[in-house]
């Protein structure tokens, strides 16, 4: 459980620091776009009032609070699940990534009313119209890690591997 809390705290700090640095200090909110390493990396300001790729972005205040409640509910569920399970280190790190990323985006919804997205990556003649942030990366990596590392083991072994029978 300590691993989850530490990872979540670091992810939350890194996410909020990156948003403070790029959105406020570098003035992306006013400028709109900064070419960092075109076309591979561009900082492009986007206020996401919905979920991934702006889905469910009605712009209404009730949707903001619904998404905050949903994210906090998922965070509580993941934390309780990890606390009650004997998950291995990789699964706990993954849970920390997911929780920290979710809390980073919840913080944005409280502070700005929307999630501050600013990373845009394109390549090879394909222009990506979407922006994301470090919290989104952490949520994705955490969910993938949980899918890979949290299942398949016997209850209580913490390894994610099936326990074998010992010879008498």
Image: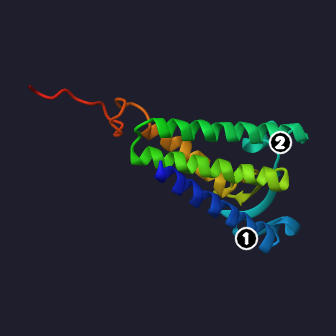
* Front-most of residues 69 and 83: 83
**Is 145 positioned to the left or the right of 139 in the image?**
left
Residue plotted at (59% across, 58% down): 9
Q: Residue furthest right?
A: 60
Residue 4 pos. (x, y %): 51, 50
Residue 142 rendering spot, x and y as whole percentages: 54, 46
Residue at the spot of label 2? 64
Q: Which residue is mark 1?
A: 21
Q: Is residue 4 above or below residue 40?
A: above
Is disc 2 placed on a helix, strand or loop?
helix
Q: Quadrant of residue 63?
A: top right
Q: Residues within 10 Å of mark 2 (few under 14, many from 20)?
A: many
Front-most of residues 137 and 64: 64
Count numbered badges in the picture: 2
Mark linked to residue 41: none
The single residue placed furthest to the bottom in the displayed view is 25
Q: Position of residue 93 (x, y in %)?
A: 48, 50
The residue depicted at 83 percent of the width and 42 percent of the height is 64
Element marked by disc 1? helix
Residue 38 image point, x, y percent = 70, 67
Between the residue at mark 1 and the residue at mark 2, the CA separation in whole angstroms equals 24 Å
| Local crowd size for mark 1, using a 10 Å CA cut-off: few (<14), some (14–19), many (≥20) | few
**Mark 1 vs mark 2: which is more N-terminal?**
1
Q: Are marks 1 and 2 in contact (CB under 8 Å)?
A: no
């Amino acid at each position: 459980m300590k691993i989850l809390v530490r990872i979540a705290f670091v992810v939350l700090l890194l996410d909020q620091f990156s948003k403070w640095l790029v959105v406020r200090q570098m003035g992306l909110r006013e400028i709109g776009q900064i070419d960092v390493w075109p076309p591979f990396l561009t900082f492009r300001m986007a206020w996401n009032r919905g979920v991934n790729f702006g889905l469910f972005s009605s712009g209404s205040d009730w949707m903001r609070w619904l998404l905050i409640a949903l994210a906090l509910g998922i965070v509580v569920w993941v934390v309780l699940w990890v606390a009650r399970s004997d998950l291995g280190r990789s699964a706990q790190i993954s849970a920390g990534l997911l929780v920290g990323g979710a809390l980073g985006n919840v913080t944005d919804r409280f502070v700005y009313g929307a999630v501050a997205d600013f990373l845009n990556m394109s390549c090879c003649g394909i222009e990506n119209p979407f922006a994301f942030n470090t919290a989104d990366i952490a949520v994705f990596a955490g969910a993938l890690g949980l899918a890979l590392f949290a299942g398949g083991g016997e209850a209580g072994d913490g390894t994610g591997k099936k326990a074998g029978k010992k010879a008498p």
